[in-house]
Image: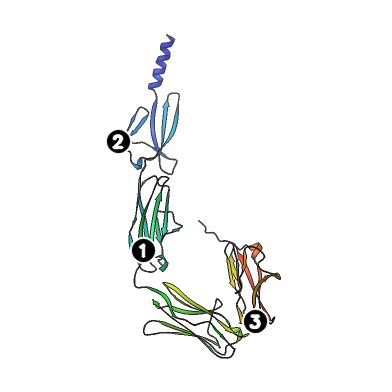
């Protein structure tokens, strides 16, 4: 009698079980009951999915209840499918300054990573949509989208063309390096072309030249559309020596040419403006030396010749490079010393300020 009652109890317990399946909503902890239909069926506690598709992939939860309690168990279903990709549009022509959008459309499962290349080089973008807010000359080219998982990858390509008739600036005529005695006037000339017509500016040792009593800058446009720019220096001094540069610039590019003007005289160092640089960046500065000939150019800090560590590099032309600048160790006043063979020298100081990195507020 006791055996029968136990059997009946087990029989009752078995048939009082209630099983239900749920599927979690992707990326959340929320779940919803699995909808049963002709393709998705439940037989006792077994969930049967016929002709599974990628959309069936996900995390499922089975919940079992009876009169004395309940249990649940999770399982993950991954429905694999071959990867394929295409970029929409496959080609587009965009005017300078206008936005461009490429969309990487892909199928297959699972997708682990999405990456983009431009002209064969990786760019830091991992979303399906690549948007360029304002197209520039350097943005034109071939773009590739790659989708990958652990087993395979797929790739698609598209081309971005620059609309309108644009020709980046090009320097057509230049001035040579010149060595001279003080006294005569100097005439430097640059001719540049491009569409749109570029503007030409002049620099001496990296500092823009403005018109004054002895320096005169001018330009005109020829009938062929080229820009002719000139720099006149009246009664050149030894202190006028240095690296002169003409820069042709338009909205579609930049071209430049530089050459040295050597004027015989004692060493001279032009005043250097305070240099501000963000921590972690690399400092590049060239000592603005005039006078000719110059036997040596060195940099010092606290009366010690550089370099004093591996971050610092000093070159014979007076260029100082400090990598990965830090406020505590690199913010200081640096001194450039230029000497000639007779022992005459000139000194100039540069104050370097290192600023903290700025962070964008999300």
Q: Is residue 213 above or below residue 20?
A: below
Q: Name the residue beneath numbered marker 3.
A: 267
Q: Residue at x 46, y 79 (%)?
A: 200
Residue 170 appears left or right of 239: left
Figure label count:
3
**In which quadrant of the rendered view does residue 51 lie?**
top left
Q: Say the numbered circle drawn on residue 160.
A: 1
Q: Mark 3 packing: few (<14 Cα in 10 Å), some, or many (20+)? A: many
The local secondary structure at tag 3 comes to strand
Residue 150: image location, x then y, percent: 43, 45
In the rendered structure, which disc, 3 or 2, sits on the residue that comes first in sequence?
2
Q: Mark 1 packing: few (<14 Cα in 10 Å), some, or many (20+)? A: many
**In which quadrant of the rendered view does residue 337 lie?**
bottom right
The local secondary structure at tag 1 comes to strand
Q: Is residue 164 above or below residue 118?
A: below
Q: Name the residue beneath numbered marker 2.
A: 39
Q: Residue at x 43, y 50 (%)?
A: 113
């Amino acid at each position: 009698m006791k055996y029968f009652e136990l059997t009946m109890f087990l029989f009752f317990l078995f048939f009082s079980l209630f099983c239900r399946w749920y599927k979690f909503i992707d990326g959340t902890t929320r779940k919803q009951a699995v909808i049963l239909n002709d393709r998705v069926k439940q037989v006792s506690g077994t969930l049967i999915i016929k002709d599974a598709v990628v959309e069936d992939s996900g995390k499922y939860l089975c919940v079992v209840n009876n009169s004395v309690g309940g249990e649940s168990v999770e399982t993950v279903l991954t429905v694999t499918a071959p990867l394929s990709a295409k970029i929409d549009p496959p080609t587009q022509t965009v005017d300078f300054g206008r936005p461009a959008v490429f969309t990487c459309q892909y199928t297959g499962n699972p997708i682990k990573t999405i990456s983009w290349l431009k002209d064969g080089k990786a760019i830091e973008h991992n979303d399906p949509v690549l948007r360029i807010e304002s197209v520039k000359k350097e943005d034109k080219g071939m773009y590739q989208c790659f989708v990958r998982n652990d087993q395979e990858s797929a790739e698609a390509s598209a081309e971005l063309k620059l609309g309108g008739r644009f020709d980046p600036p090009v320097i057509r005529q230049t001035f040579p390096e010149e060595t001279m005695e003080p006294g005569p006037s100097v005439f430097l000339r640059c001719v540049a072309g491009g569409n749109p017509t570029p503007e030409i500016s002049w620099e001496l040792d990296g500092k823009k030249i403005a018109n004054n009593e002895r320096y005169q800058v001018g330009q005109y446009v020829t009938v062929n559309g080229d820009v002719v720019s000139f720099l006149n220096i009246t009664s050149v001094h030894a202190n006028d020596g240095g690296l002169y540069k003409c820069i042709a610039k338009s909205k579609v590019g930049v071209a430049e040419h530089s050459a040295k003007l050597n004027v015989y005289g004692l060493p001279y160092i032009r005043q250097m403006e305070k240099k501000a640089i963000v921590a972690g960046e690399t400092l590049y500065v060239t000592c603005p030396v005039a006078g000719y000939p110059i036997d040596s150019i060195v940099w010092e800090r606290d009366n010690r010749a550089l370099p004093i560590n591996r971050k610092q590099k000093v070159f014979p032309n007076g260029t100082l490079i400090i990598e990965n600048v830090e406020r505590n160790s690199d913010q200081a006043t640096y001194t450039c010393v230029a000497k000639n063979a007779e022992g005459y020298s000139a000194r100039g100081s540069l104050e370097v300020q290192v600023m903290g990195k700025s962070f964008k507020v999300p």
